[in-house]
């Protein structure tokens, strides 16, 4: 059984009275009847241009957004039928790494507080145990223990993204949504983050939904790739197959338009 099962997932945003309506119905179908499975231990990469619905799809799966239609099952549990209390418990196993390492960390908190926040909410750990867990997480993402007492603005973009990854790992989740985690970084730093994510997947037994507009980045990390276009998945398949012999014209366009990246 898949860890994540999505069937007919749809998100429609209605538009008000405007000359800029996208169609006669006055609505935007950000995600349009998407169905997919994500298996334990794999990385499913989702690629597509800006506005294709990638990030909306990821947030729907985590129930950060409520869908218009469809079903989402996580580890056999119907996420759209669980109550608030049960959903809170499930969030321990479902975490997110945000795109913007500058905006996703509260500048008022020290790094140790940023990383420990999920532990305070979900686990009853003493202050010493929390500090030890934070030190372990910092080491896991390649940062020194001394980073714990500093503030986010004292770090580079790549280091901030490592802090965000440590926070996502704090509760030892099964599933992580990585929403364009390297798009705000330069190529060399982004490559280091991608390599780190690959290493952490092996160490922690993680399952990823990795969202990106860069096919070469996704090709390096993903087990399978789904290509999104205008809210729909137009092609999905094993990484090697899709990047060598893509079937859909849009997949071929993405492959031809994106330069190679050395990782």
Image (tube, helix red, strand yellow):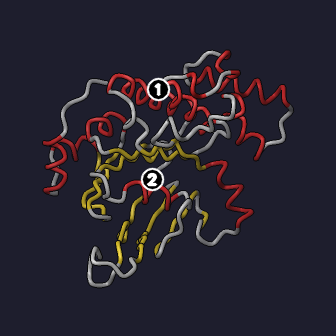
In this rendering, would 42 be left or right of 146?
A: left
The Cα atoms of the two marked residues, 2 and 1, are separated by 27 Å
| Of 133 and 36, the residue lying toward us | 133
Q: Which mark is residue 158?
A: 1
Q: Residue at x 19, y 39 (%)?
A: 258
Could you tell me residue 109's position as x and y percent?
A: 69, 33
Question: Residue 192 is drawn in which quadrant?
Answer: top left
For label 1, the SS is helix
Of the two numbered discs 2 and 1 on the same chain, state the one appearing first in sequence: 2
Whether residue 147 is situated above or below residue 43 in the rendered picture: above
Mark 1: few/some/many CA within 10 Å (<14, 14-19, 20+):
many
Residue farthest to the right, as pictured: 126
Could you tell me residue 252's position as x and y percent?
A: 14, 49
Question: Residue 184 is drawn in which quadrant?
Answer: top left
Residue at the disc numbered 2:
38
Q: Residue at x 55, y 41 (%)?
A: 104
Nearest-to-viewer mark from 2 and 1: 1
In this rendering, would 152 be left or right of 48?
A: right
Could you tell me residue 61's position as x and y percent?
A: 50, 59
Q: Which mark is residue 29?
A: none
Q: Give the position of the C terminus as an image quadrant.
A: top left
């Amino acid at each position: 059984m898949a860890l994540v099962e999505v069937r007919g997932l749809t998100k429609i945003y209605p538009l008000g009275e405007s000359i800029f309506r996208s169609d006669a119905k006055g609505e935007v179908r950000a995600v349009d009847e998407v169905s997919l499975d994500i298996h334990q231990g794999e990385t499913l990469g989702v690629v597509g241009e800006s506005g294709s619905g990638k990030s909306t799809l990821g947030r729907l799966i985590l129930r950060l957004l409520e869908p218009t239609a469809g079903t989402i099952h996580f580890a056999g549990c119907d996420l759209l039928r669980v109550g608030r209390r049960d959903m809170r418990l499930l969030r321990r196993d479902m975490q997110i790494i945000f795109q913007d390492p500058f905006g996703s960390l509260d500048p008022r908190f020290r790094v140790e507080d940023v990383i420990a926040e999920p532990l305070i909410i979900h686990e009853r750990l003493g202050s010493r145990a929390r500090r030890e867990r934070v030190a372990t997480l910092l080491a896991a993402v390649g940062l020194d223990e001394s980073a714990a007492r500093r503030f986010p603005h004292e770090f580079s973009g790549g280091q901030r993204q490592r802090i965000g990854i440590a926070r996502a790992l704090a509760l030892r989740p099964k599933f992580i949504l990585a929403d364009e985690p390297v798009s705000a970084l330069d190529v060399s730093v982004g490559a280091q983050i991608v390599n780190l994510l690959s290493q952490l997947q092996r160490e922690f037994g993680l399952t990823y939904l990795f969202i990106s507009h860069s096919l070469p980045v996704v090709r390096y990390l993903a087990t399978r790739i789904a290509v999104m276009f205008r809210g729909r998945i137009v092609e999905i398949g094993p990484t090697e197959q899709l990047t060598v012999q893509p079937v859909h014209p849009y997949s071929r366009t993405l492959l031809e338009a994106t330069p190679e990246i050395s990782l």
